[in-house]
C-alpha cells in the first residue's frame, strides 16, 4: 500500500476569497475505490462560517440584481468556458472522490458546461407579460424579481451537474448564492466554484461553505437572511428542511427519493429493454434518484427477458472508475456500501430470490474499496423493503405481472413518484402509461434515468415539494412575480 506524503487542503469561498473555517477543523474526502487514498481535505465549518457567507451574499445582492440579465449571463458564459477547459481534470477528481466511471464523470462535467450556457442565454428572455387592464388609460404588466439569498444544499452523486443546475438559474435571475456541497464530494465542488471565481463573479455573489449537514446545512436552513433553500437528497432530510423553512416563511424546493419502475410489456423490444434496464438501474452504481429499481415484466416475456438480463449483467466489469474497461465503479462510501448490503440481506430474509450478485467484492484489486456485485432479485412482492424503499445502489427487483393494468397499478404502489419508463410498441399501452403513471418524468422506450437540462424536472407524491427544476421552469422558484399598474395623470 502506497503511503501518501501530502494531501491538499481546500478552503471555503466567502466574499470572493478562499478562507479557512473558524473551527480550524477539516474533513478528509476518501477515494471509494481505495479507502487508503485521501483525495483532499475540506473545511469542517460551523455556524459562524455560514453567518459570514450569508452576510456576504446579502451585501452583494443589491448590485448583482441591478445588472442586466445579459450582463449576468456573461459571467456564466465565461465560467462555462473555464469549466470546459478543465473538464478532464475535474472529471478525474470526481471519479476519485465519489467513484463513478471516468466516462460518466466527463459526461457530467460537460453537462455542467451546457447548463451554464443554457442559463446564460436565459438572461435575454422575457421576464413578464402585458395584461389588459379594465382601465383603458392604464398599462398593466408583470415582471419578475429575484428571491434574494438562496441556500443550495447539494448531494454527492452528481457533484458538478446538480450544484450547477441549482446555482446557474439562481444567478441568472439575480439571486446570490450560499452553497453547501455534500462533504463526500466537496473537492469536486471546490473546483466548480474555482471556475466561477476565475470567471470574475463579483465578490459575495457566490459563496461556498463545506462541512456537515447538521452544522452547515442546518445553519443555512435556519438563517433569517436566507430567502430560499433548494435541496436534493433524502426524504428524511428534505422533509426536515421543508418544515424548518416553512416555520420562518422561507421558500423551499425539495428533490428527494425515487423508487422508479420500468414496465416491460409483452410486445416490447426485449434487447432494447434489457439494455435500458441495465443502464438505468446499474450505471453510476445505481446511485441516482432516477435509477431503475423495480422491473415489472409481463408474464409472456418474463423468462426470455430474465435470461437476456442475467446474461448481460454477468458481463459487467466492476472496478476502479479510472480504469477504461470498468463499467461500474464502487459505492460512494463505506456507509453507502453497508446500506446496499443490508437491503440485499432484507430482500433474502423477506423471501425474494437472489438470482445473481449481491456480494461484496473482496478480490485483491477490490478489497480496499467499497465494491458490490450488481444484484438481481425475483419473486419480489410489493410489500417487501426492496420493492418499497429507496436503496440507492445496484439492485434490480424483477416483478411478474399478467396485464398492463396490473403493471401500472404495481408501478404506482409506492410513496414515490419521480420517474418511470415503459418498453412497448403498442400505442394503447403507451397512452395508458402516460395518463395513469404517477411520476413527474415518464419515458417511453427509454431508461428511467434520463433528464434533459432544458426540460422541467421533479417528482410527484413523496419525491419532491412539487416544484420543478431545470429548463425555464426554474424561474418559478428563483423569482417572485411583481404586478405593475401604471396610469398617467
Image (cartoon, grey):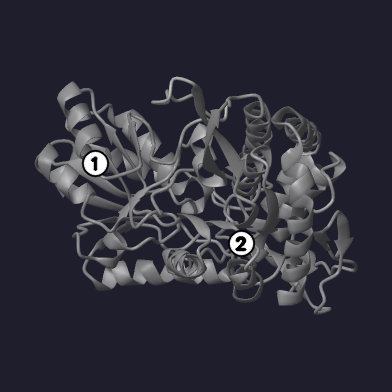
- What is the secondary structure assignment of the residue under circle 1? loop
Residue 197: x and y in percent read 84, 46
Name the residue at the front extreme.
489
Q: Which residue is mark 2?
A: 366
Image quarter hosting the N terminus: bottom right
For residue 443, above or below residue 396: above
- What is the secondary structure assignment of the residue under circle 2? loop
At a point 55% along the width and 61% down the height, the residue shown is 371
Q: Is residue 452 visible?
A: no
Q: Nearer the viewer, residue 77 or 150?
A: 150
Image quarter hosting the C terminus: top right
For residue 302, above or below residue 13: above
Residue 437 bears which disc, if any? 1
At a point 51% along the width and 40% down the height, the residue shown is 481
Marks 1 and 2, how far apart at CA:
40 Å
At a point 84% along the width and 70% down the height, the residue shown is 3
Amino acid at each position: 500500500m502506497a503511503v501518501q506524503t501530502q494531501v491538499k487542503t481546500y478552503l471555503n469561498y466567502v466574499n470572493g476569497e478562499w478562507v479557512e473555517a473558524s473551527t480550524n477543523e477539516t474533513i478528509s474526502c476518501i477515494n471509494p475505490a481505495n479507502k487508503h487514498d485521501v483525495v483532499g481535505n475540506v473545511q469542517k465549518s460551523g455556524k459562524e462560517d455560514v453567518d459570514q457567507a450569508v452576510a456576504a451574499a446579502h451585501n452583494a445582492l443589491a448590485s448583482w440584481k441591478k445588472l442586466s440579465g445579459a450582463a449576468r449571463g456573461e459571467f456564466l458564459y465565461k465560467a462555462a468556458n473555464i469549466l470546459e477547459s478543465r473538464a478532464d481534470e475535474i472529471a478525474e477528481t470526481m471519479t476519485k472522490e465519489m467513484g463513478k466511471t471516468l466516462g460518466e464523470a466527463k459526461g457530467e462535467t460537460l453537462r455542467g458546461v451546457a447548463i451554464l450556457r443554457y442559463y446564460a442565454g436565459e438572461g435575454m428572455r422575457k421576464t413578464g407579460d402585458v395584461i389588459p387592464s379594465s382601465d383603458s388609460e392604464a398599462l398593466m404588466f408583470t415582471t419578475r424579481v429575484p428571491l434574494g439569498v438562496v441556500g443550495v444544499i447539494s448531494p454527492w452523486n452528481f457533484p458538478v451537474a446538480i450544484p450547477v443546475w441549482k446555482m446557474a438559474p439562481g444567478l441568472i435571475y439575480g439571486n446570490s448564492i450560499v452553497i453547501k456541497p455534500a462533504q463526500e464530494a466537496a473537492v469536486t465542488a471546490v473546483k466548480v466554484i474555482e471556475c466561477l471565481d476565475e470567471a470574475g463573479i463579483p465578490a459575495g455573489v457566490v459563496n461556498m461553505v463545506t462541512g456537515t449537514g447538521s452544522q452547515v446545512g442546518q445553519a443555512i436552513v435556519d438563517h433569517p437572511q436566507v430567502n430560499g433553500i433548494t435541496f436534493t437528497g433524502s426524504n428524511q432530510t428534505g422533509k426536515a428542511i421543508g418544515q424548518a423553512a416553512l416555520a420562518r416563511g422561507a421558500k423551499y424546493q425539495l428533490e428527494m427519493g425515487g423508487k422508479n419502475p420500468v414496465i416491460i410489456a409483452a410486445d416490447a423490444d426485449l434487447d432494447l429493454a434489457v439494455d435500458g434496464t441495465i443502464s438505468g438501474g446499474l450505471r453510476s452504481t445505481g446511485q441516482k434518484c432516477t435509477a431503475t429499481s423495480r422491473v415489472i415484466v409481463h408474464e409472456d416475456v418474463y423468462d426470455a427477458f430474465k435470461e437476456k438480463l442475467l446474461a448481460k449483467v454477468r458481463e459487467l466489469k466492476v472496478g476502479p472508475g479510472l480504469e477504461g474497461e470498468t463499467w461500474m465503479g464502487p459505492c460512494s462510501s463505506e456507509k453507502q456500501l453497508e446500506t446496499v448490503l443490508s437491503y440485499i440481506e432484507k430482500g433474502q430474509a423477506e423471501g425474494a430470490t437472489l438470482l445473481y450478485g449481491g456480494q461484496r467484492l473482496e478480490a485483491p484489486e477490490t478489497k480496499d474499496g467499497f465494491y458490490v456485485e450488481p444484484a438481481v432479485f425475483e419473486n419480489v412482492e410489493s410489500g417487501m423493503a426492496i420493492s418499497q424503499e429507496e436503496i440507492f445502489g445496484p439492485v434490480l427487483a424483477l416483478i411478474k405481472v399478467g396485464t398492463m393494468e396490473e403493471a401500472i397499478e404495481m408501478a404506482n404502489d409506492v410513496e414515490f413518484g419521480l420517474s418511470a419508463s415503459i418498453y412497448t410498441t403498442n400505442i394503447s399501452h403507451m397512452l395508458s402509461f402516460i395518463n395513469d403513471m404517477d411520476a413527474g418524468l415518464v419515458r417511453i422506450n427509454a431508461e428511467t434515468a434520463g433528464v434533459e437540462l432544458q426540460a422541467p424536472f421533479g417528482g410527484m407524491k413523496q419525491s419532491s415539494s412539487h416544484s420543478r427544476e431545470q429548463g425555464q421552469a426554474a424561474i418559478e422558484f428563483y423569482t417572485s412575480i411583481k404586478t405593475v399598474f401604471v396610469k398617467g395623470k
